């Protein structure tokens, strides 16, 4: 592989995508500056698990996206050729509880970086982590780049603001600002509050007798789930394009949360039967009849995104990007990783 001498800045390196993207860019020869938040205890388990924490070309810096002057200093000191803005309050459920903080971090935060780029280093290329949540109450199936947006959560609204500001800086100032509208992507490094990882970690705990029952919210929601490691490669391709633009990354397959639960238990050798409807629905072991899944209203959201399915045709044609890992393979990979972690007595 031809090595580059470029410099990249990744905000949110402690998150799922930040860790995988850092790994990819380091492999390509980039000098990477990755930002993390000041917290009482550091949160480097993902970059440790990938074995890149002590990489000589990786520099970790403290940064809060809500602070404009820090954003300016960050662009000054990192001198990036490419900026990947992955930092966000990214949990949809929490955004209903913390709409103002979500607007500030997930929405305005992106503008702090765009302003810093405009003022300090207007040649830097900027990637904004946009989301299928902007389609929300979907206006077309499958969703494509020009499907009208209709966000259904404070998170989706904040991301839509950041998305349009990226387009606006592109059109107003000629900034190379691109936006990847990424559909859900998962991996063993996914945070445990998101539904796929919650399911695979709970399945592992149930098999190992560390948990009795998995409690979930809406099992009918349908998502287009892909593999995060492939999606960060798509992010990189988006910034290598000749022109700044907006691209969807998705698999064009949608399944319910219930399907993912069934798949995860199957991956651990357990067949599950569902009975009942709505809040009364339960899932039982097909062999023993033991209760394994029940519904808890606390996991329902005030407004739900019922169905997402994305058409990645534009990214396939123009960037040569394509998803490869099937949902079955992804789910199996996550179940096996969580079995291993729980057997070893730790699980992040
Ligand atoms: P994660 O939640 O795993 O990571 C988010 C990162 O943002 C973490 O490093 C977090 O730090 C950091 N962060 C949060 N608040 C701040 C702040 N105020 N200042 C600086 N950093 C902050 O998200 P993912 O890796 O899954 O997603 C990456 C991006 O892509 C996010 O913007 C997300 O909204 C977006 N996205 C994700 C999709 C997915 O399916 N994964 C799909 C579409 C878009 P800490 O570790 O300290 O919390
Ligand atoms: P999402 O992901 O909201 O799509 O946002 P999440 O995994 O949180 O929810 C997916 C669907 O599952 C339903 N659900 C539950 N969700 C959680 N978290 N916990 C539960 O117990 C549960 N039960 C049912 C939800 O209602 C929802 O319909 C993710 C994030 O990564 C965003 O940052 C990103 O932008 C989008 O994906 C694309």
Image (tube, rainbow, N blue to C red):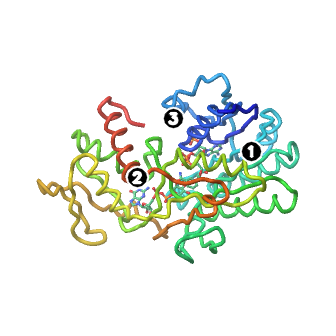
| 191 w.r.t. 91: above or below | above
- Which of pointers 2 and 3 lies earlier in the amino acid sequence? 3
- The quadrant in which the C terminus is found is top left
Between 105 and 174, the residue placed more toward the observer is 174
The label shown at residue 196 is 2
Pointer 1 residue: 67
**How far apart, in angstroms, are the residues tagged by discs 2 and 3?**
17 Å
**How far apart, in angstroms, are the residues tagged by discs 1 and 3?**
25 Å
- The quadrant in which the N terminus is found is top right
Check disc 3 and report its element: helix, strand or loop: helix
Beta carbon of the mark 2 residue lies under 8 A of ligand 2: yes
Pointer 3 residue: 46
Q: Image check: 24 left or right of 298?
A: right
Whether the residues at callouts 1 and 3 have beta carbons within 8 Å, the answer is no
Quarter-of-image position of residue 19 = top right
Q: Nearer the viewer, mark 1 or mark 3?
A: 3
Q: Horizontal and vertical percent for residue 125?
A: 78, 47
């Amino acid at each position: 592989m031809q090595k580059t001498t470029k410099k990249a800045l990744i905000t949110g390196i402690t998150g799922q995508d930040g860790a995988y993207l850092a790994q990819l860019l380091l492999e390509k020869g980039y000098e990477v500056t990755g930002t993390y938040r000041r917290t009482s205890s550091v949160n480097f388990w993902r970059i440790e698990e990938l074995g890149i924490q002590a990489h000589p070309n990786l520099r970790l810096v403290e940064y809060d996206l809500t602070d404009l002057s820090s954003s300016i200093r960050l662009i000054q000191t990192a001198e990036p050729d490419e900026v990947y803005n992955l930092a966000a309050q990214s949990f949809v459920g929490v955004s209903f509880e913390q709409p103002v903080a979500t607007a500030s971090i997930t929405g305005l935060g992106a503008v702090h970086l765009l302003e810093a780029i405009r003022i300090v280093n207007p040649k830097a290329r900027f990637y904004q982590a946009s989301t299928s949540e902007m389609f929300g109450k979907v206006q077309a199936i499958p969703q494509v780049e020009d499907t009208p947006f209709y966000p259904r959560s404070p998170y989706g609204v904040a991301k839509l603001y950041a998305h349009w500001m990226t387009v606006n800086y592109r059109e107003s100032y000629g900034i190379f600002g691109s936006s990847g509208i990424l559909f859900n992507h998962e991996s063993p490094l996914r945070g445990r509050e998101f539904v796929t990882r919650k399911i695979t970690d709970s399945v592992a705990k149930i098999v190992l007798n560390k948990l009795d029952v998995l409690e979930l919210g809406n099992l009918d929601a349908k998502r287009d789930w892909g593999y995060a490691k492939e999606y960060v490669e798509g992010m990189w391709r988006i910034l290598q394009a000749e022109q700044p633009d907006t691209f969807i990354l998705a698999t064009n397959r949608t399944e319910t949360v219930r399907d993912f639960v069934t798949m995860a238990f199957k991956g651990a050798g357990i067949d599950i039967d569902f009975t009942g409807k709505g809040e009364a629905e339960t899932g039982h072991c097909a062999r023993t009849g033991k209760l394994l899944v029940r519904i808890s209203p606390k996991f329902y959201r005030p407004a739900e995104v019922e169905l997402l399915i994305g058409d990645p045709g534009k990214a396939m044609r123009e960037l040569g990007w394509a998803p490869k890992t099937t949902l079955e393979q992804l789910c199996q990979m996550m179940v096996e990783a969580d079995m291993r972690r729980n057997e070893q007595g730790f699980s992040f």
